[in-house]
Image: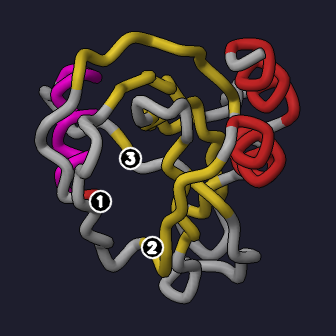
Amino acid sequence: MAKEKLFHVGVKALITNRAGQILIFETDTSKFLTPEQSHADLPGGRIDIGEDPLAALKREMVEETGITDFDGAELFTSVISPIQIPISQTERVGLALMVYRVTVPEGSTVTLSDEHTGYEWVSAREAARRLTYKFGQEFADTLLQAHA
C-alpha cells in the first residue's frame, strides 16, 4: 500500500484589473459529491491529459469567466490547498494549485459558468480574507505582501 498522499494538480487565475482589484467567485457547491460550505475561489481547474499548465489556465479562464483577452500569465505562487477533493464516496485526494497572475483590460465582461453563483472585484485584503478557506493562510499572507 502506498504511503504517499495523492494530489490532483490544478491551475488558478489571480485576475487583477488596472485598479489593483482581484476578481473572486462564489463557488456553487450544490453539485459536489460530499457537502461543502460555500466559499470564495479563483477561476481555474485541473489540467487535462496532454495539456500544459498555461493552456489549461487559458481554457479555464474562458470557460469560467468568458474573458478571452488578458495580459500574460506569470506564476504567482503554488499552494497545497487545505481542501481535499472527494473522488468517490470514501476517497479524497489533495489539491496542489499553481496560481498565475493575469491582468484583464478595463471593462472586461465577466460571464458566470454554472460552477459559480456570483463574482466580485475586491481589494487584496478582502480577497486574502475570503480565499483563505480554499487556499490557506500562507497564500493569504503572500497575496497581502505582494499588494502592500
Residue located 48% across and 80% down the image:
117
Q: Secondary structure at mark 3?
A: strand
Query: Image quadrant for the C terminus?
Result: top right
Identify the element where label 2 is drawn: strand
User: In which quadrant will I find the N terminus?
Assistant: top right
Query: Which residues fall within the magenta stretch?
Result: 52-64
Q: Identify residue type, mark 2.
A: His
- At which x and y percent is residue 141? 84, 23
Of residues 78 and 3, the one drawn nearer to the viewer in this rendering: 78
Sequence-earlier tag: 3 or 1: 3
Find out whether the residues at labels 3 and 1 contact each other: C-beta distance under 8 Å: yes
Residue 22's place in the image compared with 25, above or below, is above
Q: Is residue 88 left or right of residue 83?
A: left
Q: Is residue 59 magenta?
A: yes
Residue matched to label 3: 45
Q: What residue type is disc 3 on?
A: Gly
| Pointer 3 with pointer 2, Cβ within 8 A | no
> Left or right: where does residue 44 sit relative to residue 58?
right
**C-beta proximity under 8 Å, tags 2 and 1:** yes
